[in-house]
Image (tube, coloured by chain):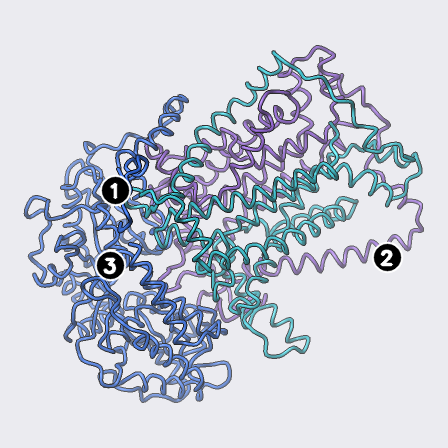
């Protein structure tokens, strides 16, 4: 851990997993001694039962959809049971870390991009290359893509289940209502065009309306901006890949267009800036593609239905072309899984089973499996098609590698959020706020 | 020796809560004061209830209009939020979450009532070595924030295979670890005159009989208070059920409620508000019924 | 004393210590609590103390670092001090206000008012919502830009009103108000305590010619002191450990600009978001010491103002 080694007995004790366990076994033993273990109603967890514990995150609707799909794995094999362990995202990450501490991780679970390196590096994840060949069938995938998912010396810990990119969403109905029907061409627009469009809408719509909410804290879009500057959140060797200017100009943009009257001041929205949250005070939204379905469903109930269209994210004038990127939802097997092979075939089911196109569609982003994507396309669901079209347009463009945050880098998201908070709520100068954030991130990296 | 025999030593002229000074006042003045009192109480109540009334109103408002309307007058009417919320969730869904919440809450209530009352009796009335140290340790146990305790406790329960059962939630209550309630009951007991248990012991009742026949009935307000708080706190508890209950068929209501709004898109406000109302109903009803037992405390029962 | 019910007169002389059989039965009564203390409380307590001297990221075994966490906290962590200040302000403002409000209303409602059940329930209802996820939204509705509070103020002629939740100067105060809003819990405990006061003491006081105020100061207050004391300790500990209000209202960030960064929220973020559980444990133990000091002082002072009937 990069600390000066000391020979103290306690350190040696503490550094050993086994010793730490025996430390806890002490208290555990007391429980047993109290005769309380007999109260246990849980069956002991053993590999012989053929149960796959599967944990994922999502709102209740996604929990239902994916739960149904995952349970159907039981039909593909005799005597196999799937125990569903869903939770909403914030709860999911808390529970996962507690489970990791208790060496009681579910057999298979989703992994957010920001923490995958930390989990892999700590030995909490099972190296899928150790599975018998063919357990997970990658034949439908592009080999280059599959290899790009490898982490830490090229080990396959966490294949990608679904992916999504940032984009812009326009409430066309709202724009038409104020007489703006001529929307910019999203193949050619840049951030200045977006800012101007926001101002135009705000002017046309009048008091109490703005073009777009202050979404400076949206770290995926900040990431996009950084890449458009030719920089990167993290370099391949785990260092911070951007400087104060690269991120600072992002906040500059928001400040400028707020001053111009196009952006809802942060004080008004108080962090509520999605289509479902702003109370329709604006016409433009920055989104991730996997938010679109919810927004689409929500829009149907509003004011006789609003037409939402997806537009490609604007560029920075003069940015290169290979800045496009995707965020991943990954699938992992726990190092403590009772039956890694069974878990592996469950992952295979999640990645490859054709029924996923019908049952899940794009409920959690665009599936990584191209066959599933084409099957979804054939279903001609209008909302799904919009998302797939947009993802396809992004996928056509070159995309240089996007290294996952290294060990200790999971705080990169909070860097963007805190800087935005400091700047737009606290009046901290942009350069100071960004530099503070970078310093904090650097010290996190140094510590890990 | 019976309860009445003990109490008979304390028999006094029967009277309700005394307000003789009021009776002596002139009637109109009294009425005016009563009216002012009512107006103030009503205004206060309205202020207190504004957020809850808004919650009720919004739960029947179409979801896309919820955040545009801050007033208490409904802009539309729909039961969609309720039906969507009610049908949400994995496992056996919201109805089973409610049943599970009841199981946990009732288990905790039984645990706290039994274990805390006897521990409190020992601390308040019996002499034993190490009492002060133990009392201090008891309070120290609640001074450490739960998020620090959670991981070691989880490791402990996981090592004996109790994760994914209700035991990690209920067992601590059966073992009087909710020290707040022990302390509460100690404070109540110290307000009960010692002459009562002494009279009992003079009449030959042992410690146990004294506790069950004399002390326990006198502790009714404290026991009811404990019941109310245990019910509400555990009904609303989120973090412990989150880490200990993995299987959706064991989920409690807060876990289901938490999943209704999507972190990513912010959608699901309507069903979340509707199910918050649903979640509020049992505890509100429970409180409404239980509070009567507090009111009928020692002043109007034991000492009449 | 004229009323004949001065505390000192009801206090009985100290009993000789009971030994042997009584001591044994004491331990029998304490048995569940002792088991619980050893198994449920002591284990994690000791474990967290141990972890506070380690670097522990939850995923990997803890590494012993001696007092480093404590040193960092006091010498190199401005947010630690910020969170102490936020929690301190919250404790010292909201606890007294909440207790006074709860006590006043409990006494007010204890006297015969028509519809008392309804009032009591109305005032208690907010406490039931407690830390529900809905609170985050409800507080936005009350204190947001177009919220109920601003509607009220603009009706009174005020202009340029802020979003109180998103303003670093006011956000903490919205949480203080939230705490006051849920004053039902101490109120109920006060009510139970008022009901515990034997009616004949009031009767005696009346016979001795004491007016309402005298009854209040000579009967109600002294006999209620154990409960006031309990509520004080309870609210003090609860406020020091307050987490959920800040978590739901600030959506887990402690913002804007750390203005609602409660101590326990910072501790949680360190432990579970930054995977820094060793540091979080150290913070936990510092909080234990702080609460311990305040509780200890209260117990010391309680000898001067809390009256026990035993």
Q: Which residue position is annotated with label 1?
A: A53
Q: Tell me: A120 left or right of B13.
A: left
Q: Quadrant of the C terminus of chain A?
A: bottom left
Q: Is residue A137 visible?
A: yes
Q: Name the tint of chain A in the rendering.
A: blue
- Position in image of residue A251 (x %, y %): 37, 77
Pick out the residue farthest to the top.
B204
- The alpha-carbon separation of the residues under discs 3 and 1 comes to 27 Å
Q: Position of residue B163 (x, y in %)?
A: 35, 36
Q: Is there a contact, CB below 8 Å, between mark 2 and mark 3?
A: no
Compare residues A33 and C82 and report the one nearer the observer.
C82
Q: Colour of chain B?
A: purple
Q: Which residue is drawn at the image coordinates 45% and 36% (left, top)?
A: C45
Q: Residues within 10 Å of mark 2 (few under 14, many from 20)?
A: few
The tag earlier along the polypeptide, 3 or 1, is 1
> Element type at marker 2?
helix
**Chain C pictured colour:** cyan
Residue A60 visible in the snapshot? no
Write down the residue under mark 2. Answer: B32
Identify the residue under disc 3. A406
Element under disc 1: strand
- Tag 1 and tag 2 share a subunit: no
């Amino acid at each position: 851990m990069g600390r000066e080694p000391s020979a103290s007995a306690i350190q040696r004790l503490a550094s050993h997993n086994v010793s730490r366990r025996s430390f806890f076994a002490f208290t555990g033993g007391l429980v047993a001694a109290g005769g309380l273990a007999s109260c246990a109603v849980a069956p002991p967890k053993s590999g012989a039962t053929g149960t796959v514990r599967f944990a994922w995150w999502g709102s209740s609707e996604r929990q239902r959809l994916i739960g149904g799909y995952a349970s159907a794995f039981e039909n593909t094999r005799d005597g196999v049971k799937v125990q569903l362990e869903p939770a909403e995202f914030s709860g999911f990450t808390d529970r996962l870390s507690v489970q990791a501490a208790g060496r009681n991780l579910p057999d298979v679970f989703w992994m957010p991009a920001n923490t995958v390196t930390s989990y892999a590096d700590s030995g909490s994840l099972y190296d899928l290359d150790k599975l018998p060949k063919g357990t997970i069938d990658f034949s439908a995938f592009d080999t280059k893509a599959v290899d790009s998912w490898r982490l830490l010396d090229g080990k396959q810990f966490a294949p990608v289940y679904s992916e999504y990119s940032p984009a812009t969403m326009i409430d066309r109905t709202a724009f038409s209502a104020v007489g703006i029907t001529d929307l910019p061409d999203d193949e050619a627009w840049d951030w200045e065009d977006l800012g101007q469009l926001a101002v135009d809408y705000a002017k046309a719509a009048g008091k109490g309306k703005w073009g777009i909410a202050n979404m400076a804290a949206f770290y995926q879009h900040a990431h996009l901006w950084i890449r458009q500057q030719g920089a990167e959140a993290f370099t391949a060797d785990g260092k911070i890949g951007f400087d104060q200017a690269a991120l600072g100009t992002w906040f500059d943009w928001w400040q400028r267009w707020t001053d111009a009257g196009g952006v809802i001041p942060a004080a008004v929205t108080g962090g509520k800036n999605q289509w479902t949250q702003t109370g329709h005070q604006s016409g433009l939204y920055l989104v991730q593609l996997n938010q679109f379905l919810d927004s689409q469903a929500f829009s149907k109930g509003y004011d006789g239905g609003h037409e939402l269209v997806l537009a490609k994210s604007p560029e920075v004038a003069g940015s290169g072309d290979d800045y496009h990127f995707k965020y991943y939802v990954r699938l992992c097997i726990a190092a403590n899984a009772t039956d890694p092979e069974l878990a592996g075939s469950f992952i295979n089911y999640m990645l490859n089973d054709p029924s996923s196109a019908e049952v899940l569609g794009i409920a959690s982003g665009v599936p990584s499996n191209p066959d599933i994507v084409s099957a979804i396309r054939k279903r001609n669901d209008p909302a799904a098609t919009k998302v797939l079209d947009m993802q396809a347009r992004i996928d056509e463009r070159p995309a240089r590698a996007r290294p996952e945050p290294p060990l200790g880098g999971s705080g990169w998201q909070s860097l963007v959020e805190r800087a935005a908070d400091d700047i737009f709520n606290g009046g901290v100068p942009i350069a100071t706020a960004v530099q503070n954030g970078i310093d904090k991130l650097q010290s996190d990296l140094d510590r890990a | 020796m019976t309860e009445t025999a003990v109490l008979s030593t304390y028999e006094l002229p029967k009277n309700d809560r005394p307000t003789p000074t009021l009776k002596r006042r002139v009637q109109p003045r009294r009425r005016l004061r009563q009216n002012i009192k009512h107006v103030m109480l009503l205004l206060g109540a309205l202020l207190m209830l504004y957020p809850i009334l808004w919650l009720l109103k919004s739960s029947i408002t179409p979801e896309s209009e919820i955040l545009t309307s801050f007033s208490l007058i409904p802009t539309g009417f729909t039961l969609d939020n309720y039906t969507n919320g009610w049908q949400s969730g994995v496992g056996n869904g919201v109805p089973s979450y409610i049943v599970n919440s009841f199981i946990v809450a009732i288990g905790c209530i039984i645990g706290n009532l039994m274990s805390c009352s006897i521990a409190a009796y020992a601390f308040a009335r019996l002499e034993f070595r190490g009492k002060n140290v133990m009392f201090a340790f008891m309070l120290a146990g609640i001074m450490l924030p739960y998020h620090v305790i959670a991981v070691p406790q989880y490791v402990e329960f996981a090592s004996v295979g109790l994760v994914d059962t209700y035991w990690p939630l209920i067992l601590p209550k059966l073992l009087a670890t909710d020290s707040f309630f022990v302390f509460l009951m100690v404070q109540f007991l110290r307000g009960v005159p010692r002459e009562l248990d002494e009279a009992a012991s003079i009449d030959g009742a042992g410690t146990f009989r004294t506790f069950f026949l004399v002390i326990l009935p006198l502790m009714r307000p404290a026991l009811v208070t404990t019941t109310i708080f245990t019910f509400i706190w555990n009904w609303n508890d989120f973090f412990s059920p989150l880490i200990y209950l993995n299987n959706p068929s064991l989920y409690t209501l807060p876990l289901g409620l938490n999943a209704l709004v999507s972190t990513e898109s912010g959608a699901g406000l309507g069903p979340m508000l509707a199910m918050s109302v649903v979640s509020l109903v049992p505890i509100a009803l429970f409180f409404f019924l239980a509070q009567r037992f507090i009111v009928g405390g020692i002043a109007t029962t034991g000492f009449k | 004393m004229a009323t004949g019910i001065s505390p000192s007169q009801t206090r009985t002389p100290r009993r000789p210590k009971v030994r042997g059989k009584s001591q044994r039965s004491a331990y029998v009564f304490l048995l569940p609590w002792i088991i619980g203390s050893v198994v449920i409380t002591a284990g994690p307590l000791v474990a967290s103390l141990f972890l506070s001297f380690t670097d522990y990221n939850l995923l990997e075994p803890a590494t012993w670092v001696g007092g480093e966490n404590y040193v960092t906290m006091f010498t190199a962590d401005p947010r630690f001090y910020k969170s102490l200040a936020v929690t301190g302000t919250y404790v010292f403002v909201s606890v007294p206000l909440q207790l006074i409000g709860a006590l006043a209303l409990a006494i007010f409602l204890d006297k015969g008012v028509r519809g008392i059940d309804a009032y009591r329930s109305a005032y208690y209802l907010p406490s039931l919502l407690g830390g529900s996820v809905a609170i985050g939204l409800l507080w936005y509705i009350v204190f947001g830009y177009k919220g109920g509070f601003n509607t009220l103020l603009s009706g009174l002629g005020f202009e340029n009103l802020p979003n109180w939740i998103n303003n670093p100067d006011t956000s903490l105060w919205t949480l203080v108000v939230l705490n006051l809003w849920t004053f039902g819990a101490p109120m109920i405990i006060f009510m139970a305590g008022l009901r515990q006061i034997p009616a004949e003491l009031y009767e005696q006081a009346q016979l001795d010619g004491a007016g309402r105020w005298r009854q209040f100061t000579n009967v109600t207050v002294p006999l209620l002191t154990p409960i006031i004391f309990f509520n004080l300790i309870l609210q003090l500990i609860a406020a020091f450990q307050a987490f959920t209000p800040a978590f739901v209202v600030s959506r887990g960030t402690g913002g804007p600009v750390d203005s609602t960064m409660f101590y326990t929220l910072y501790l949680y973020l360190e432990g579970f978001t930054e995977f820094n559980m060793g540091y979080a444990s150290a913070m936990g133990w510092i909080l234990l010491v702080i609460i311990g000091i305040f509780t200890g002082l209260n117990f010391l002072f309680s000898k001067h103002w809390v009256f026990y009937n035993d």
